Amino acid sequence: MSLKSFHIVFIIASSLFMVYFSYWAVISWFDYRDLSYLLYGVLSIISFFLLLVYSNKFKNKYKELSS
């Protein structure tokens, strides 16, 4: 597996995990009303968007290296 393929698979898996984790955190917050679950949800949403930024930077960097 090439470095590019590994990064793409890792970013997709991590992004899906962040989406699921934020869903779990919000559902748990509605059930228990504990602020830590709300914090987990916010952090996972921020992590999801940072992964999107990282994926765009990686694609651009890999295009530069391939050319």
Image (cartoon, rainbow, N blue to C red):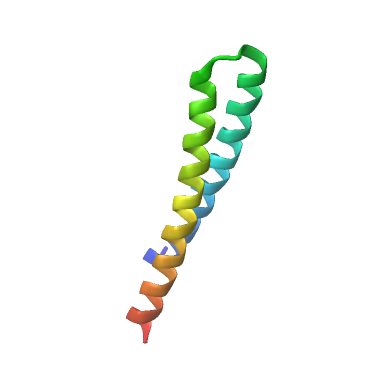
Instruction: Tell me: 65 left or right of 38.
Output: left
Q: Position of residue 28 (x, y in %)?
A: 62, 20
x, y percent for residue 49? 50, 51
Residue located at (45% from left, 61% from top): 55
- Image quadrant occupied by the N terminus: bottom left
Q: Is residue 13 above or below residue 8?
A: above
Q: Residue at x 44, y 70 (%)?
A: 59
Residue situated furthest top in the rendering? 32
- Is 48 or 14 nearer to us in this picture? 48
Identify the residue at the far bottom of this view: 67
Q: Is residue 65 visible?
A: yes
In the displayed structure image, the side of residue 32 where residue 59 appears, left or right = left
Indicate the position of residue 25 as horizontal and vertical percent values.
58, 27
Left or right position of 37 against 53: right
Q: Residue 62 versus residue 27: which sits nearer the camera?
A: 27
Q: How many marks?
A: 0
User: Can you tell which quarter of the image residue 61 is in?
Assistant: bottom left
On the question of residue 7 being in view, the answer is no
Looking at the picture, how far across and down is residue 2, in whole percent? Answer: 39, 66
At a point 54% along the width and 32% down the height, the residue shown is: 41
Residue at 48%, 20% in the rendered image: 36
In the depicted structure, whether residue 60 falls above or below residue 30 = below
Give the quadrant of the C terminus.
Answer: bottom left
Q: Nearer the viewer, residue 37 or 8?
A: 37
The quarter holding residue 29 reads top right
**In the displayed structure image, the side of residue 46 where residue 26 appears, left or right:** right
